[in-house]
Amino acid sequence: MKINENYKKLNESYLFSTIAKKVNEFIKLNPSKKVIRLGIGDVTRPLCKSVVSALKSASDEMGTMEGFRGYGPEQGYDFLKEKIQKYYLEKNTHLELDEIFISDGAKSDLGNILDIFSKDNTVLIPDPVYPVYVDTNTMQDRKIILLEANKENDFLPMPNDNLKGDIIYLCSPNNPTGAVYNKEQLKAWVDWALKNNAIILFDAAYECFIDDESLPRSIFEIENAKKCAIEFCSLSKTAGFTGTRCGYTIVSHELIFNDMSLNKMWLRRQTTKFNGVPYIIQRGAEAVFTPQGQKEIKENINYYKENAKLISQTLKKHNIWFTGGKHSPYIWLKCPNNMTSWEFFDYLLEKAAIVGTPGSGFGKCGEGFFRLTSFGTNENTKEAMQRLDELLK
Ligand code: MLT
């Protein structure tokens, strides 16, 4: 029996598990200190009223002879897909219902999608970025080329004629930097992908945070993107589903490679390995896309945006360089006094009992940077900023 030796190449634990372990150790040693968590992007606003009421009535339905449902369609119920179809139509993108696949969140699908691609592919991954892209490809031993994202390119790496690769990950608004590609920049990536017979895996988990109408919230706002891109979306950050679990992935019929339809391959993969998202949850997700649901989730997003403002103001006051926080829940800052990312993590935890995320956890180019999230409660964010203000004096 041989194990998958590629796991040896991974860090011992996933970034956010490592942080959780460190924080738990700190709490054990300092039980009286109130730790404020602005690390993992986990939401704090409760589910909105429309969602809760939909979850309740779907639960009641499941307890009746007529309303009970067993296995559902692996790719999701039409009632939810129809709502998502309409949501995309508002962004001028027409999707067929069978191009929409309901999932239990973007993270799973971003990893699982690799099942339909050969291990021989070369993968391009921006650095710094959401660690799931590198880890899942490392598990399958794909060749990875990192694309440097830095202050000089506004943390938005761009293609050039010499760049070669088969799969490229783009995350916009970006986790962790909060940088957002404009339409022209995304078009350059679409053109590059079409020219190189490559596929773009577009992570749009944070699209709801974009305020500027001119910035693309979906890669399908770019002409011909349906021929070269798969889009991953999630209700985690949009509607507070981090613990409820629901997302969706768009695989267009126009994705044909070697006479194979990626849509059909993904359907085959999902029907074989996935039994779908629970009916009750899909009813809750459906409520997100109603006019009332949209109004309610917008209130929550605005609440987080207020937190982002608070964090930004504190950093400005102390002349700390930062980006993000505008079209994104994340604020990406330069560690003060040239500290490394983990040094600043320890310093902030020890001295102010604030948890953030070390930039180096998102890749080599993240070294010397740090990520704070605006997903905390307003009270805690205020308190954390008072502590930070004191500390930086
Ligand atoms: C993050 O903090 O980067 C995210 O919460 C991780 C995730 O969405 O899985």
Image (cartoon, helix red, strand yellow):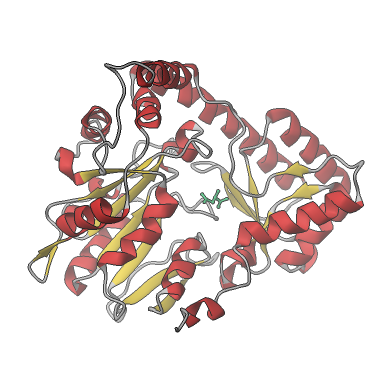
Residue 150 seen in the current view: yes
Q: Is residue 311 left or right of residue 236?
A: right
Q: Is residue 323 left or right of residue 244?
A: right
Which residue lies at the image location 17% right of the left edge and 38% below the top edge? 97
Determine the image quadrant of residue 31: top right
Along the viewing direction, whichever of 274 and 293 lies nearer the viewer: 274
Q: Looking at the rendering, in which quadrant would you find the N terminus?
A: bottom left
Provide residue 186's location: percent of width, then percent of height.
Answer: 31, 56
Provide residue 284's location: percent of width, then percent of height.
Answer: 40, 26
Whether residue 186 is situated above or below residue 281 in the rendered picture: below
Which residue lies at the image location 75% right of the left edge and 33% below the top edge? 380
Along the viewing direction, whichever of 54 and 1 lies nearer the viewer: 1
Determine the image quadrant of residue 21: bottom right
Q: Is residue 51 left or right of residue 339?
A: left
Whether residue 43 is situated above or below residue 116 in the rendered picture: above
Provide residue 219's location: percent of width, then percent of height.
Answer: 28, 50
Q: Is residue 98 left or right of residue 37?
A: left
Which residue lies at the image location 20% right of the left edge and 74% below the top edge? 196
